[in-house]
Image (cartoon, coloured by chain):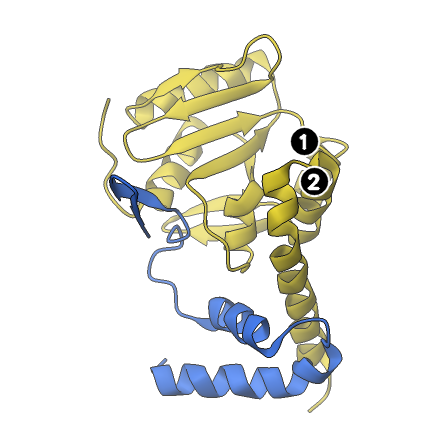
Amino acid sequence: MTPAALARKIEKAAARIGPRLTHISPEDLRLILWNLFRPKKDPGDFLLKRVGKNRWAR
Amino acid sequence: MGKIAAPLLAVVARAIEKVGLECIVIGNGAAALQGAPVTTIDIDFMFRKTKRNIDKLARLAQALGGHLSRPFLPASDMYRLITEDVQIDFVSRMHGIRSFESLRSRADKIAIGGSVLRVAALEDIIKSKRAARREKDLASLPILEKALAVKKALSAMDDTPH
């Protein structure tokens, strides 16, 4: 999926479900949708790794 | 202590499958696998505490080149597996969850590499964090509850005739 297609998919879903989810801000809604729709190359990419003093990376 | 090659979760899932340990991903790792936008530095599992499964935990530690310990004895029922790359906690009890079987009945199976991991349902993760009431659990609750609401709304949208 191209970034443009991903953005379209997020906006389409946000337009359909957003009005019902009034307790979720538009920013949070799009963040959650992006996380649900984005292609994941590594399913464990939620794990933070320490890469140095006070430095963490996914 | 051995080094685990990436992708880490696939290596862990394969090792769990290899030793035949029945366990369920819980905590923020499970929430992330269920689509919530959260991160964590460790992976938590629930398992059924039997002599046989504790032996399997020891074999798992060996397979991952890690070290298995019980860091908070005697107060805790937790087993901790430490490798250079990840810390994995195994618990046999969870706040707000009646039993391993009840958690398993609602868990999803998620393919990780060539293996399959059981992952706790987002509803159960939220229920457990609400019951635990630790500061870090309460802090992550709002985003988990929002992610659940979005997933439910998407699911309802899929069921709606277009």
B43 is higher (above) or lower (below) than B91 = below
> What amino acid is at disc 1?
Met
Residue B150's place in the image compared with B44, above or below, is below
| Horizontal relation, residue B80 to residue B30: left or right | left
Residue type of the residue flagged with mark 2: Ser
Quarter of the image for the N terminus of chain A: give it.
Answer: bottom left
User: Residue drawn 40% across and 31% down?
Assistant: B87
Specify whether A29 is left or right of B106. Answer: left
| The label number, if any, that marks residue B125 in the structure image | none
Q: Position of residue B106 (x, y in %)?
A: 70, 47
Residue B107 seen in the figure: no
Q: In the rendered image, which residue does mark 1 sit on?
A: B94
Disc 1 vs disc 2: Cβ atoms closer than 8 Å?
yes
Q: Element at badge 1?
A: loop
Colour of chain A, in one word, is blue
Location of residue A46 with respect to B5 vertically, above or below: below
Give the x, y percent position of residue B111: 46, 53
Looking at the image, which residue is at 66% across and 40% down? B104
The front one of B114 and B73 is: B73
User: Residue lying furthest bottom in this view?
Assistant: B162
Q: Colour of chain B?
A: yellow
Write down the residue under mark 2.
Answer: B128
